[in-house]
Image: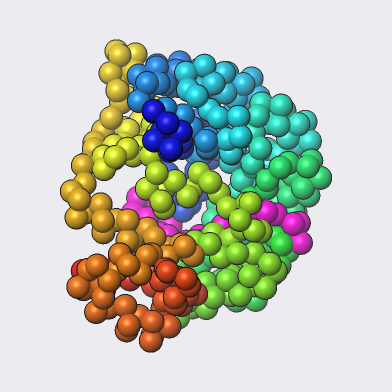
Amino acid sequence: MTKADAPPAAGLYVHVPFCRSKCRYCDFYSLPSISLVPEWLRALEQEAILYRDRFASFDSLYLGGGTPSLLSTGALARLVEILAGHFDILPDAEVTLEANPNDVTPERLRRYRELGFNRISLGVQSLEDGELAFLGRRHSALQAARAMERVRASGFPAFGVDLIYGLPGQTGAAWRRTLRKTVSFAPDHISCYQLTVSRGTPLWSMQQGGLIDPLDEDQERLLFLTASEVLTGQGFVHYEVSNFARGDRYVCRHNMKYWERTPYLGLGPSAHSFQGNTRWWNHRSVRRYCRDLGGGKRPVRGSECLSDEQASLEKLALELRTKAGVSIRDLRDSEKGDRALPGLLEAGLLEVIGERAVPTREGFLVADRLPLLFL
């Protein structure tokens, strides 16, 4: 097999299902305890063994959660040892660790770099104390600022920050303050996620009980546009609906796997994987995960195999979330696509750049609806 024929390097995701406490909005699977970390690590190695021959190589590794930075540096070292021992992780791989501001110390940052992490994603969420309290975060705005200062001072090769907008009662002025102060710490990447109130979370119960009122669509639109205008005005590239990078060098390679439908393997409870047109996902239970792997069984809860038509639609939907957009030729090969394209261009939702139709800022606002216009 020539290099040109070799399959593309995949992405490797590890779900670290442990937190100190659960935030009010979070519907990701995690436990507010670290008592099962040793058992989880043993199971994780068994899962790695089951998949070690399925993917040729990986050029991204992402530790998400949960709270990966809650793990001791010893547990992190063991995790890295397991992954390096069973997978071909390329020398120039992007290796990311999600971290909470309260866990960031100069000593830990030094140790993260020694373990091979070259990208850190800091869960700041807001720089307004009232908003942090509402979300149930454990850190204050001052602690978040100090953490960003420490990461930047450490010389970490790439530094990202996660923010949340669309909180009940959130003002444009408060959101603009958070954005501008975040930029002042010179991160390389900023993700701005709109708050989702998911069933089963404390925020869902509060909303159902009439204790909070969600923002209306116009208010959410204003906050989205504010983020895009402020960050692009500071030199960031708005390369995906929720993501901004200080140039192509800092685009998150791992997350691009999802949007470009590149294969990825997810290890850990609730983790998702994708290869070919098949997607599968693990049980949302550490105990079930450990029990299955202890018996030599993959901890898979479900799977789906997309038809060619479903795969094409998914590809279109994901491409319309990024600044790369979609091939005009692909759209014109479809009768419906050829009919829809002129209207979208006229409405200012898409623009033509080279041979591709690319979402505008207004197009990003309705990215989830755009694919429906090509059906």
In the displayed structure image, the side of residue 121 where residue 205 appears, left or right: left
Does residue 341 appear anywhere in the picture?
Answer: yes
Quadrant that contains the C terminus: bottom left
Magenta stretch secondary structure, dominant:
loop
How far across and down, in percent of the image, does residue 22 sit?
50, 43
| Total count of labels | 0
Q: Position of residue 258 (x, y in %)?
A: 41, 48
Q: Quadrant of the N terminus?
A: top left
x%, y% of residue 4?
A: 43, 38
Task: Kindly give the residue lying farthest to the top in the view shown.
Answer: 295
User: Is residue 200 rendered magenta in the image?
Assistant: yes
The residue lying at 21 percent from left, 46 percent from top is: 306
User: What is the x, y in percent for residue 9?
Assistant: 46, 36
Residue 355, compared with residue 163, is above or below; it is: below
- The image shows residue 97, relative to residue 238, as above or below, that is above
Q: What residue is rendered at 32% in x and 33% in y?
A: 282
Find residue 211 and report its image quarter. bottom left
**Any part of residue 37 in sight:** no
Q: Which residues are magenta?
A: 184-203
